[in-house]
Image (tube, grey):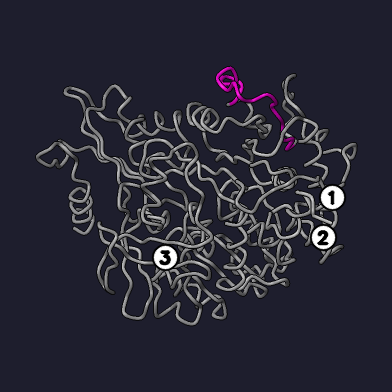
Amino acid sequence: MALNRLQENLLRRATLGDLVTRSALRFGNRTALVAGQEMIDFKTLNEKSCRAANAFLEMGIAKGDRVAFMTHNCLDYIYCRLGLSKIGAAPVPLNFMLKGEEIVYIIQDSEPRAFFVEDSLVESIIPVQPRLPSVQHFGWFDFGSGKPIPADFVNLKDFLSDKYPAAEPEVVIDSDDMATLMYTTGTESFPKGVVTTHLNYYMSMLHLACDCDFRREDVLVIDIPLFHVAGTTVLLASITFGSKAIIAYAPDPMNILRTTEAQKVTMWIYPPTLYHALPSIPGFEQFDLSSLKKCISFGSVMAPGILERWKGIKPDIQWRNYWGQTESSPVGTTSAPEDFEEKINSIGISDTGVTVRVFDENDQELPPGQVGELVIRGPAIMNGYWRKEELTEKTLANGWLHTGDMGFMDQDGYYHFTDRKKDMIKTGGENVSSQEVESVILGHPHVNQVAVIGQPDEYWSEAVTAFIVPRPGQDIITEEIILFCKERMAGYKVPKKICVVAELPMSPTGKVLKRKLRDEYSKQRAQ
């Protein structure tokens, strides 16, 4: 008897919803997630995800639809995003620090049919609601703020109730279907929607097992935001491998230490800023970190000084530097613990399942030691940018993901990151477009010209730094500029440093020479 379409699909597909189903069968009553006093086993996680899936179906959400979320980490978001995977719809997670026009742009671009927002963030949504015509349903994450829920908002506590069945939805989903639509800021003024497939994430799971040593006995803290590709893949890995994940609202150094001691956490995954900050927490020496075995640093390489400090604290930790991006799900390169100290300035070797090369401007491979653009190919690479065909073709030209990151491979086959091809700043693990920050600052009435760059910073890795030329007869007051920016953009994009200058270095064509600006600023700091 011939298989029907669903049977044929179920026979060999690779989807995220099925990961949850299979882990429920494999691990059953083992604890999957811990949030505060609540403990969720793998069987219950799958049941709640199925109830969420069926609730979305009754709401009218169908395969191919998008549903937006703007919230800190919580269990209800996890149930929703896994439930959407079971019906072939895609979550669109927004950075919870976004405001006003930033939110409007992403919602208008992605056109979700529903938008669920954390209770404390709803006030930033109400004024722009009329400008979000695609959204048919607004939802409310109840974190106990005590604020009244708007009359037209769905309360997630009711939405995820037991009135919806825990049966697996019968939906045909292909491995190359969109699993998430995640917005990332690059060199353009506006964020781009990255279309990531179910198969892309499956490759991430293979890579994390092989290259990052994720294991069933691991206990992880997931406090890096789940709107970020790093948080998403770590969550999926913990579910896939049967690990225990401690879900925290947001990164908090004291909570990291308390949780690690109480839950016997085995692995940390943070940008270098947190590894730098943690030993300086008052009372740090009193915490028992004996369970901690593995630490991954992402966003930039680990500074030697940070490693030396940790070697004195806990010398048995296995350290890894990690490089990837949303467009690669985020598979790229990882350094091995046995080579970490010797190659601390390296981002490692190519990850399992992908090929990394260094290309010149003509897409010709460069020999070791020569700086070019880092490019990647493999099953982890995105399908493309949402509704940006020309940019997709350019980024995926000649069958390679052009990352926009510059680097080189050394004689031992290790890759090194050197610079951004264009003016994107990586600060505290987040990407910031210098052009976007410049456009905001130029709206200040006292500003004539501005150039924004990233400057090396021990804490932030790169500090957003603005060089401002004032209008004739006007004064630039640093506090005013910072407040002006805070009112118009997410906090991590706001300049950490402001320098008032008489002029900006220019090329004959009128382009600001940011390389020269960086060099001059570095010389001033060295004096």
- Which element carries disc 3, helix, strand or loop? loop
Query: In the rendered image of this protein, does residue 477 appear above or below residue 418?
Result: above
Residue furthest front as drawn: 1
Q: Which residue is mark 1?
A: 47
Residue 24, numbered circle: 2
| Span of residues in magenta | 125-143
Label 3, label 2: how far apart the Cα atoms are: 36 Å
Q: Are marks 1 and 2 in contact (CB under 8 Å)?
A: yes
Position above or below: 167 against 277:
above
Give above or below for 329 relative to 99: below
Q: Is residue 3 visible?
A: yes
Sequence-first tag of 3 and 2: 2
377 sits left or right of 133 in the view:
left
Q: Residue furthest top?
A: 130
Residue occupied by mark 3: 301
Q: Pick out the residue farthest to the left.
A: 508
Mark-to-mark CA distance, 1 and 2: 9 Å
Identify residue type, mark 2.
Answer: Ala
> What residue appears at the point 39 percent right and 46 percent down from the top-left corner?
393
Q: What residue lies at 42% left-to-right and 56% top-to-bottom?
A: 459
Kindly identify the amino acid type of the residue bearing the numbered disc 3.
Answer: Val
Disc 1/disc 3 C-alpha distance (Å): 40 Å
Q: Kindly indicate the quadrant of the structure image that contains residue 263.
A: bottom right
Residue shown at 64%/25% (left/top)?
135
Magenta stretch contains residue 138: yes
Tell which of 132 and 99 is nearer to you. Answer: 132
Query: How far from the left and from the top, in percent, is residue 221?
Result: 66, 60
Which image quarter: residue 175? bottom right
Pick whichever of labels 1 and 2 is earlier in the sequence: 2
**Around disc 1, counting alpha carbons within 10 Å, would you say few (fewer than 14), some (14 to 19), or many (20 or more)?**
many
